[in-house]
């Protein structure tokens, strides 16, 4: 059974870029300000080149102060465009993101652009960052991470590099985003449990707060309380399968376990299922009903057959590319915020409604 929710689109307009011509800043200008040779400046902007970090930083600082944007190809000297879009996907090895990168790359090729995966740094607080984004000579950025600090978005704004947030939102940033309708997904999960007569439910979330996950949680908890008069419990665990097991075991060791659990990700849902069945002898869905989110390939395996939500990554990719290309070509700084419907995929971890 598949159910679709409606989508919402709204935008906040801001003035377009000035079309007045500006003096062209060259690598010679950067070299003069940084006190290095022009060839050194050129080497700095070639990833992997043998230039000391101290010299690189001097060049980056000079380039920033002059608002210098290096070009990827000689043909771009007249247009100041590289035809490259930077993709920032810290979780690129996650099965869904691997497929998403392919979808985005295909959509970009249709528009005459190429994709380049940009590396990142992680600080002691597990925050991701990309210092000096302009060194990668991209015309725009599509970023899919809720753990990036605001510096990436602030630097893109400073250098007029359009950036679109993909399926994630870093709050407090001035950038467009394309996300799934997480609030509606949470509501629907609560409604489904209610139809099945559930009176005790838990939302199992990750221990890293994100805007999209928060929307899902609020949608679920608010709707469940409205329908049943009872509050859904919220429990935080690690997003990683193995690291989440301890918290999940503790939940089942309590005097009474919930009748149903809505999980922030399929990984968490599969961990719940394994602990419940293998360690506590619970039957699914007779003793415990479980709903996940993402519809990763493993959810269809015979030992899971997980009821879950499927995000429309093809449309998310298409809309993200459409926005970033439009902002590059039209020099339009309007902020677009788009929510894409999700699908509810009913399998064997929930009972069938009568």
Image: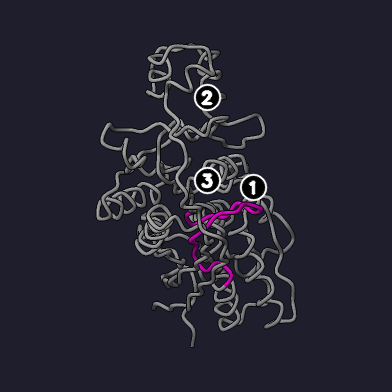
Mark 1 residue crowding within 10 angstroms, few (<14) / some (14–19) / many (20+)? few
Residue ID for mark 3: 241
Asked if labels 1 and 2 touch by Cβ distance under 8 angstroms, the answer is no
Q: Position of residue 71 (x, y in %)?
A: 36, 33
The number of discs equals: 3
Comes first in the chain, label 2 or label 1:
2
Percent x, y of residue 82? 33, 39
Is 68 above or below relative to 188? above
Span shown in magenta: 165-183
Q: Would you call the spot at circle 3 few (<14 residues within 10 Å), some (14-19), or many (20 or more)?
A: some
Task: Point out the tag, 2 or 3, that comes first from the N-terminus.
Answer: 2
Q: CA distance from mark 2 to mark 1?
A: 32 Å
Q: Which mark, by number, is residue 208?
A: 1
Mark 1 / mark 3, whichever is N-terminal: 1
Q: Is residue 299 above or below residue 343?
A: above
Q: Residue at x 64, y 54 (%)?
A: 171
Q: Quadrant of the N terminus?
A: bottom left
Residue 193: tell me if it is visible. yes
For label 2, the residue is: 60
Give the quarter of the image for residue 84: top left
């Amino acid at each position: 059974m598949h159910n679709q929710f409606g989508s919402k689109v709204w935008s906040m307009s801001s003035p377009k870029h000035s079309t007045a011509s500006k003096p062209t800043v060259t690598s010679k200008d950067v070299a003069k300000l940084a006190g290095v040779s022009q060839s050194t400046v050129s080497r700095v902007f070639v990833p992997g080149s043998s230039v000391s970090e101290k010299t690189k930083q001097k060049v980056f600082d000079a380039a920033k102060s002059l608002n210098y944007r290096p070009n990827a190809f000689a043909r771009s000297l007249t247009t100041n465009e590289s035809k490259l879009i930077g993709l920032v996907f810290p979780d690129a090895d996650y099965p869904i993101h691997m497929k998403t990168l392919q979808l985005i790359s295909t959509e970009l090729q249709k528009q005459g652009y190429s994709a380049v995966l940009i590396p990142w740094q992680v600080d002691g607080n597990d925050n991701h960052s990309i210092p000096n984004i302009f060194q990668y000579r991209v015309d725009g950025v599509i970023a899919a991470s809720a753990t990036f600090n605001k510096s990436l978005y602030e630097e893109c704004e400073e250098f007029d590099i359009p950036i679109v947030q993909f399926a994630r939102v870093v709050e407090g940033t001035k950038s467009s985003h394309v996300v799934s309708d997480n609030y509606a997904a949470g509501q629907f999960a609560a409604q489904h449990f209610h139809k099945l007569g559930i009176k005790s439910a838990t939302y199992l979330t990750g221990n890293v707060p994100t805007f999209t996950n928060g929307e899902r949680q609020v949608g679920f908890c608010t709707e469940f309380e409205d329908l049943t008069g009872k509050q859904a419990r919220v429990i935080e665990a690690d997003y990683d399968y193995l690291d989440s097991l301890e918290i999940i075991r503790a939940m089942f060791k309590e005097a009474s376990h919930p009748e149903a659990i809505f999980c922030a990700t399929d990984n968490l849902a599969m961990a719940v299922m394994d602990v419940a069945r293998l360690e506590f002898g619970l039957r699914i869905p007779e003793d415990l009903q479980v709903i996940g989110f993402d519809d990763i390939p493993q959810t269809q395996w015979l030992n899971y057959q997980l009821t879950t939500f499927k995000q429309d990554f093809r449309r998310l990719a298409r809309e993200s590319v459409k926005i970033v290309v439009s902002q590059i070509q039209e020099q339009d700084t309007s902020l677009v915020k788009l929510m894409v419907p999700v699908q509810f995929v009913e399998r064997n971890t929930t009972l069938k409604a009568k």
